[in-house]
Image: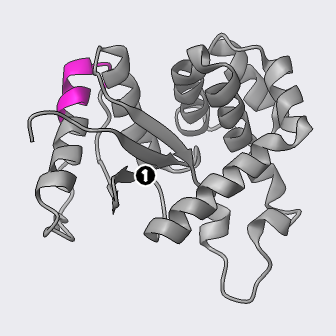
């Protein structure tokens, strides 16, 4: 494959492997990668629901866990110029700082650090439409492609869960090589269903 095609990647800010993959995406895009990438929200609470149980969307206990995804959707759809910075900031507050993304104050601080208007973003969250977007996009990839987690890379009708063990560390070239390699393998080697090291390099 000579060039990386359009592709999508799922995320939930709580997953450390989603953080790794999305940092590569962010660093690559900021470093000049010409990817046509769509960021797709995926609610992990819903993926863990057993048959016959109430959907996570209808569980009051799950509602706080939606806040960061909803904020991400608002910025993605209404303030896209801030999306990559907000995306990085929300992952960072959870995994680098140990912040609680259920707390509106924590989410607001992450938004402000990324240059977004936290008051405007959270007002859109309160309006209710971001939750509908999260649910619709989550349900669509589950229904159409049997997506079960994050990060899942979607290229055409191929959906592949990918667990990257390293972060780009500010290296845009490394980030581009990493994502190009993942997407190329999805397109060029569909016969490989699992490829997992028995030991994690230290």
Residue 77 image-quadrant placement: top right
Q: Which residue is pictured at 81% across the width and 38% down the height? A: 103
Q: Is residue 118 above or below residue 145?
A: above
Magenta part of the chain: 169-177
Does the magenta run of residues contain 176?
yes
Residue 193 in which image quadrant: bottom left
Query: In the image, 147: left or right of 169?
Result: right
Residue pointed to by mark 1:
151
Q: Quadrant of the N terminus?
A: top left
Q: How far across and how far down the image is residue 150, in percent?
A: 47, 55
Outermost residue toward the top in this view: 115
136 horizontally vs 106: left or right: left
Which residue appears at 68% of the width and 23% of the height?
110
Q: Is residue 94 left or right of residue 6?
A: right
Q: Secondary structure at mark 1?
A: loop
Q: Residues within 10 Å of mark 1 (few under 14, many from 20)?
A: many
Can I make out residue 159 in this image? no
| Residue at 87% over, 43% down | 128
Q: Nearer the viewer, residue 43 or 4?
A: 4
- At a point 65% along the width and 10% down the height, the residue shown is 115
Q: Is residue 39 above or below residue 36?
A: below
Q: Main secondary structure of the magenta part?
A: helix
């Amino acid at each position: 494959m000579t060039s990386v095609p359009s592709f999508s990647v799922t995320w939930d800010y709580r997953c450390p492997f989603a953080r790794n993959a999305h940092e590569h995406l962010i660093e690559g895009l900021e470093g000049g990668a010409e990817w046509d990438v769509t960021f797709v929200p995926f609610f992990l609470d819903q993926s863990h629901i057993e048959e016959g149980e109430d959907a996570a969307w209808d569980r009051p206990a799950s509602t706080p866990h939606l806040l960061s995804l909803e904020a991400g959707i608002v910025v993605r759809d209404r303030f896209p110029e801030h999306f990559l910075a907000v995306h990085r900031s929300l992952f960072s507050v959870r995994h680098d700082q140990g912040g609680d993304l259920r707390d509106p104050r924590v989410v607001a601080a992450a938004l402000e650090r990324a240059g977004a208007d936290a008051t405007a973003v959270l007002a859109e969250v309160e309006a209710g439409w971001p939750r509908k977007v999260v649910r619709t996009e989550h349900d669509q990839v589950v229904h159409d492609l049997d997506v079960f987690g994050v990060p899942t890379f979607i290229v055409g009708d191929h959906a592949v869960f990918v667990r990257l063990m390293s972060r780009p560390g500010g290296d845009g070239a490394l980030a581009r090589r990493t994502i190009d390699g993942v997407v190329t393998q999805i397109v060029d080697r569909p016969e490989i269903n699992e490829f997992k090291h028995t030991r994690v390099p230290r």
